[in-house]
Amino acid sequence: MPKNPLIILTRQHADNEALRLLLAAEGAEVIEYPCIQTEPIPVDQWQSTGALPPEECQAVVFTSRHGVRAFAPLLERLGRAAKTVAVVGSGTAAEVELSFGRPPDLVASPPTADGLAVRLLEILRPGMGILWVRGNRSTETFKDRMIAHGFRLAELVVYRNLPVRLAPLPISPPALLVFGSPSAAENFFECNGSEWKRCLCLAIGPTTAESLVGLGCSRIEKAREPAPEALADRIRTLLKEVNGLWDAK
């Protein structure tokens, strides 16, 4: 890996760790700076909304591994009753396999909520029930798409994002910033100021990329796949492409 500035990982430690180890093994200088924190909601406080009870859904959908972890106490019961267990991304798929003992039936390609909706439309009939397991903050893309095509959707909120108290980074740009959610990006720049918006930003997912655009970041790249190995490859490629050009002009 070429000589390069700092790589700053902004997800939670559990989500950063595999990528950090891969980068560090190649000699990269990496800082973990978690800008988001989540916690599972107790089962008796889960919020359920929608057109039918979760038990009557023919498919269970996870759009993050935080949802899988929080949902684990009921995953087996509802998952076995469902005809389809579907996820966004390889990381969420791996979490389902770990918690449920088998891989999901469907992994979205591309790994986005919209990509997941397209795949489900290929294998499910309108009128079927879909249980969407999610956090307390989410875009409406998946929900709107499924309802528009005549599916009955039940939503189950099983984890929540918590406020994060950050201390400003004791360093200055340049750096490669890796963001996994809009919330992490918002929290990062709120704490560290606009000068960091000139840095090269790698977004894990299109929703995060759109958020970075809205925040005024000028150098945004998108990850093709959220798996740690794929992210490490993408970062390696970016470093080679922009080595020596880190200071925005």
Image (spheres, grey):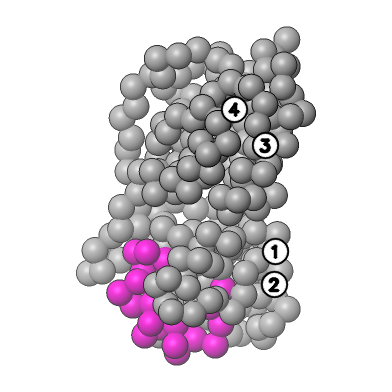
Mark 1 and mark 3: Cα distance apart in space: 23 Å
**Element at label 4:** strand
Residue type, numbered disc 4: Leu
The x, y position of residue 157, in whole percent, is 38, 63
Identify residue for label 2: 119
* Main SS class of the magenta portion in the image: helix
Identify residue for label 3: 236
The x, y position of residue 151, in whole percent, is 60, 78
- Which residue of the protein is positioned furthest toward the top in this rendering? 249
Residue type, numbered disc 3: Arg
Image height check: is 137 above or below 95?
above
Identify residue for label 4: 176
Q: Do the residues labelled 4 and 2 touch (CB within 8 Å)?
A: no
Mark 4 and mark 1: Cα distance apart in space: 26 Å
Question: In front: 95, or 114?
Answer: 95
- Return the disc, 2 or 1, that comes first in the chain's sequence: 1
**Element at label 3:** helix
In the rendered structure, the answer to whether residue 110 lies left or right of residue 92 reads: right
The x, y position of residue 203, in whole percent, is 61, 40
Residue type, numbered disc 2: Arg
- Return the disc, 1 or 3, that comes first in the chain's sequence: 1
Q: Are marks 2 and 1 in contact (CB under 8 Å)?
A: yes
